[in-house]
Amino acid sequence: MEKEQIKEKIISESIGLFMQYGMKSVTMDDIARHMGISKKTIYLNFKDKEEIILCATERYLESEMKVMESLHSTSENAVEHLYKITVCLRDRMKNTNSSVLYDLKKYYSAAWEKFVTYKHEVIFKLVLSTLKEGIDEGWFRNDINAEIMAYLRLGEIDLSFNREYFPDERFSIAEIHEQLFEHFTYGILSHKGLHLYESYKQKTN
């Protein structure tokens, strides 16, 4: 395996470990053991764990952006787009550790800045455009302020990982995300949009 392939493999395998166990608790030894390689091999490709986390964050966000763009481009309308996001989040969060964002913010500032930039430049713009599209098409209420609602959605993402409000022993991260997103969605749907959204849910059920 070539050096670049090894590096990419370390990044991809690390993403899985970080998402499952959190970033702070996963050590270089854990990564090496999980991959069946020596710790020396890891250090030949990365200066330290912080560099791995930075690269893993960049790669994960790139992947997320492609998924979000695909969901948008393959949706017939804004309601279907929202529904697809709901399903996607539910699946993604099933095996996600609630400490991921907490660890990123507290211990890995460079990677955290990458996430903050992505949140405001990608997620915000995507949510805002979807809201405006849905309002224009009559699927969403025409009395909502799309920009305020887009910022609300960003706040919900941060809130869902806040263990002070949602302790691990009481709530799963998947349940929190689903409940908050459903609450957000039902709050913006028009009467027409509500019927369409419910029809998508019934088809899945």
Image (tube, grey):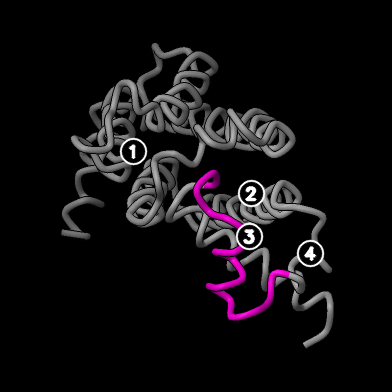
- Which residue, given by chain and number where applicable, does mark 3 sit on? 28
Q: Please tell me whether residue 109 is drawn above or below residue 173 in the rendered image.
A: above
- Marks 1 and 2, how far apart in space? 18 Å
Disc 1 or 4, which lies upstream in sequence? 4
Q: Please tell me whether residue 27 belongs to the stretch shown in magenta.
A: yes
**Pointer 1 and pointer 3: residues touching (CB < 8 Å)?**
no
Instruction: Identify the amino acid type marked 1.
Output: His
Disc 1 or 3, which lies upstream in sequence? 3
Circle 4: element type: helix
- Which x, y percent locates residue 126? 58, 36
Circle 1: element type: helix
- Marks 3 and 4, how far apart in space? 9 Å
**Pointer 3 and pointer 4: residues touching (CB < 8 Å)?**
yes
| Stretch in magenta | 23-39
Judging depth in this view, the residue of 196 and 35 nearest the camera is 35
Residue at left 53%, top 73%? 34
- Marks 1 and 3, how far apart in space? 30 Å
- Which residue, given by chain and number where applicable, does mark 4 sit on? 43
Circle 2: element type: helix
Q: Which mark is residue 177?
A: 1
- Which residue, given by chain and number where applicable, does mark 2 sit on? 61
Viewport quadrant of the C terminus: bottom left
Q: Nearer the viewer, mark 2 or mark 3?
A: 3
The answer to whether 109 appears left or right of 87 in the picture is right
Residue at left 69%, top 39%? 111
Instruction: Identify the amino acid type marked 3.
Output: Met
Q: Nearer the viewer, mark 4 or mark 2?
A: 4
